[in-house]
Amino acid sequence: MERVVVTGIGLVTPNGIGTDATWRSLIAGESAAAPITLFDADERYPSRFACEVKGYDPSEHMEKKKVKEVTRFITFAMGATKMALADASLELSDEERDTTGVFIGAGLGGLENLEKFTLILDQKGPSKVSPYLIPSIIANMAAGQVSIAFDLRGPSYAHTSACSSSAHALGEAYRWIQEGRASVMIAGGAEATISPIGIAGFSAMFALSRRNDEPTRASRPWDRGRDGFVCGEGAGTLVLESLTRAKKRGARILAEVVGFGASSDAHHITKPSPDGIGAQRAMKTALADAKLAPDQIDYINAHGTSTPAGDIEEARAVIGCFGSHALDKKLWLSSTKSMMGHLLGAAGAVEAIACVQTIETGWVPPTINLEDQDPECPLDFVANHARERRIRRALSNSFGFGGTNASIVLAAFEG
């Protein structure tokens, strides 16, 4: 089995354009939550704030004429991928392009165009519907547009598994290289659902925080005052290579992917299974795949959405999987969603990159707004301020509606 390493990363997030800008913001404990500007979120909306990507010019990452043909999530994927490829200094032979694949997860795809042209259809008729409507909204078109733009001719498809989408994409890309089917894979996730229908839909489920008067304090995982997640948007892309290829070309190796686990709660469409049994299975499977004992994990970038039930069940799942290692607070956890909101289908890839950065820099990002920790969650969540620690192995959790779970284990590269 081939070993799989990360040689490039790229981010477009509410906390910054690019990995460095995002990471500085996260380590500083800055919230990106603010009143919605992408549409008029008036008093009819129970939740009127989100974590939007600001200052992003898609024309810097793709042809201007293409920007008009696609939706926001695709432009984010293009930017994150272009940055990741540059970060990896990746050059491919023509033969390698035939096997280099692109797996980019998305939960909802181009939701804003679906909404926009549904209204146009109703108001102006079918002749006014754009021929680019369908190609702009389908979830696989982030991967498709990236494949076309960078001439990557291997497998190209989207993993759509709600908030686990890009974690599954990363895990699948890892398997392709591990099993020798490719030596390079581009894996990531992209999402952009801050639209009237998106915010209204999540609000109707009572999934979103309603702290409209204090957005920056709204996402508060494991705090007793939590009342739901904050919607975010953005993209993250990782360049994965076989260790053989990476060493041959003298690549800078950022981290190694060493384990992947996935499971289903088989319980409920939105509620996690009691005691996080499904999440436990994903974590235990990832540890077994990595051939690691629970006490060998230093840090978990938790799913940590700031929902009343989800946070408790994830804490119980971690305790069930890690036992005294977690309860004695030797294992650190944090939720970057407390700062950038929930990026839904993009969350897994973005948070895996956060794990890579933690391994690279020795800094663990905080869980902000954790002021009154829920006694049912008795773990070390790196409350409010970043901390320094040598992180040798980190785990990233992603759980989604439908009871889908995915866990990725990343490690510092050692020979």
Image (cartoon, rainbow, N blue to C red):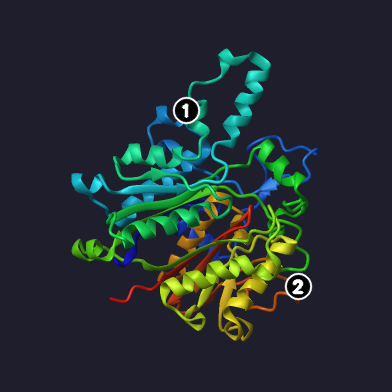
Placement of the C terminus among the 4 image quadrants: bottom left
The residue carrying mark 1 is 68
- Spatial CA distance of label 2 from label 1 is 46 Å
In the image, what residue occupies the spot 55% across and 55% down?
164
The residue carrying mark 2 is 372
Mark 2 or mark 1, which has the lower sequence index? 1
In this rendering, position of residue 82 left or right of residue 29: left
Instruction: Specify the amino acid type for callout 2.
Output: Asp
Counting from the top left corner in percent of width and height, residue 24 is at: 50, 62
Placement of the N terminus among the 4 image quadrants: bottom left
How crowded is the residue under tag 1: few (<14 C-alpha within 10 Å), some, or many (20+)?
A: few
In this rendering, position of residue 220 left or right of residue 326: right
- Relative depth, front residue between 163 and 359: 163
In this rendering, position of residue 8 left or right of residue 44: left
In the image, what residue occupies the spot 63% across and 14% down?
125
Counting from the top left corner in percent of width and height, residue 99 is at: 27, 48
Instruction: Specify the amino acid type for callout 1.
Output: Lys
Up-down: is 307 above or below 259? above
Q: Is residue 361 visible?
A: no
